[in-house]
Amino acid sequence: MKHMFASDNSSGVHPRVMEAIARANQGHAVSYGDDEWTQRAHELLRSLFGDDAASFLTFNGTGANVLGLSAVTPPYGSIVCTDCSHVATDECGAPERILGAKVSTVTGRLGKLSPDQIERVVPDIGIQHHSQPRVVSITQPTELGTLYEVDELREIAGVAHAAGMRVHMDGARLSNACAALDIEPRALTADAGVDVLSFGLTKNGAMGAEAVIAFDAEIANDLAYQRKQQMQLASKMRFLAAQFVAMLEDDLWLRNADTANRMAGRLADGAASIDRVTSVYPVQANAVFAAVPHEVIATLQKHQYFYVWEPDRPTVRWMASFDTTETVVDDFVEVIRKEVDAL
């Protein structure tokens, strides 16, 4: 099937992951996570995130986000996040419906939340007429493909914790952040003050492998029951866990993310060499946001399908995946050049 730059969800499954699922499909195994694959997955996740990290495998990213937030947000609470975050824009109101909590958005610079924006909601704490700010949710990388540095994360966590709030990270693409910053997952999460993480591998070569990682025993205590209640407990969990094992052993997760990041950088560099095509946001992970002439968009989409992010500019989004190749990138750059030059 034709390659797409629409989303890293459009890519297929890495062959090693598919092979791991097939190997797990031999005979019977104890259900609901009491199997050898799930135990190995937990072990590997602790090796990435620390011995105190408690992991709970889930079916999808929305489920992981809602489950993670449910552990730190009561129904009368509010979730502070940017107005472009997945929690606010792309989950069909799931956090609000399932949790009863309010999603409170702020406009972030380059998609990032800042400490001063958190400080502005602190006065609401203790006022019975207002939803209570209980958790800050940050996305790493952001929906605009930008990255939080460790110092930025620590500052956000410091402000949030001083106000009695928890910190949740949407890490559907955390692997790309680790590859881009050349840093261990623990340094970007537990060591930076994150309390609960939604960690995703689906966009990075898995078929469907997400997890909630709790870095605090108090948070972890109820997650098993909340996962079941929220319909995220897999009966045949070995097939989720086998994907984690395949991805985390031998650092396949990191190599896949690095490939996607490098291909995005190559695409951005190639597109920047074309008149009337400019990058809109810094290309720091595997996302490229570019301003292109409106007249060529429909034609370009026939060659490589992608999304129009901001129709008014117009800005398009090109996402590179673990299976994006230099040939695919270079061919697309030449198509862009040809179409723009013909205007």
Image (cartoon, rainbow, N blue to C red):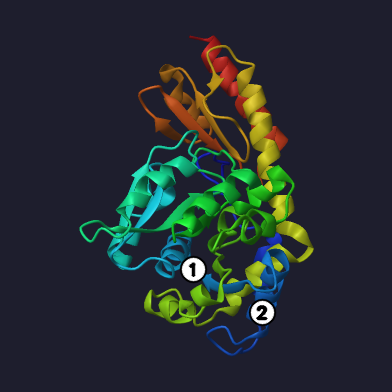
Outermost residue on the right side: it is 250
Residue 322 visible in the shown view: no
Q: Earlier in the sequence, mark 1 or mark 2?
A: 2
Residue 65 visible in the shown view: yes
Q: Nearer the viewer, residue 316 or 153?
A: 153
Residue 213 in which image quadrant: bottom right
Residue at x 35%, y 45% (from the top left corner): 105
Residue 248, horizontal then vertical, whole percent: 71, 64
Residue 134 in which image quadrant: bottom left
The amino acid type found where label 2 is placed reads Trp
Outermost residue on the left side: it is 129
Placement of 120 over or under 292, stated as above or below: below
Q: Nearer the viewer, residue 13 or 150?
A: 150
Tell me whether the residue at label 1 lies in contact with that at label 2, contact meaning CB atoms closer than 8 angstroms.
Answer: no
Could you tell me which secondary element the residue under label 2 belongs to?
A: helix
> Residue 91's mark?
none
Left or right, 102 with respect to 338, comes to left
Residue 56, horizontal then vertical, whole percent: 54, 74
Q: What distance separates the C-alpha of mark 1 from that of mark 2?
A: 16 Å
Residue 87, horizontal then vertical, whole percent: 40, 53
The amino acid type found where label 1 is placed reads Phe
Residue at x 65%, y 75% (from the top left corner): 42
Placement of 125 over or under 260, stated as above or below: below
Count the numbered circles shown: 2
Instruction: Identify the residue under disc 1.
Output: 59
Instruction: Identify the residue under disc 2.
Output: 37
Left or right, 196 with respect to 71, comes to right
Q: Sort mark 1 into few (<14), some (14-19) or many (20+) by Cα contacts within 10 Å.
A: many
Residue 188, horizontal then vertical, whole percent: 64, 53
Could you tell me which secondary element the residue under label 1 belongs to?
A: loop
Q: Sort mark 2 into few (<14), some (14-19) or many (20+) by Cα contacts within 10 Å.
A: many
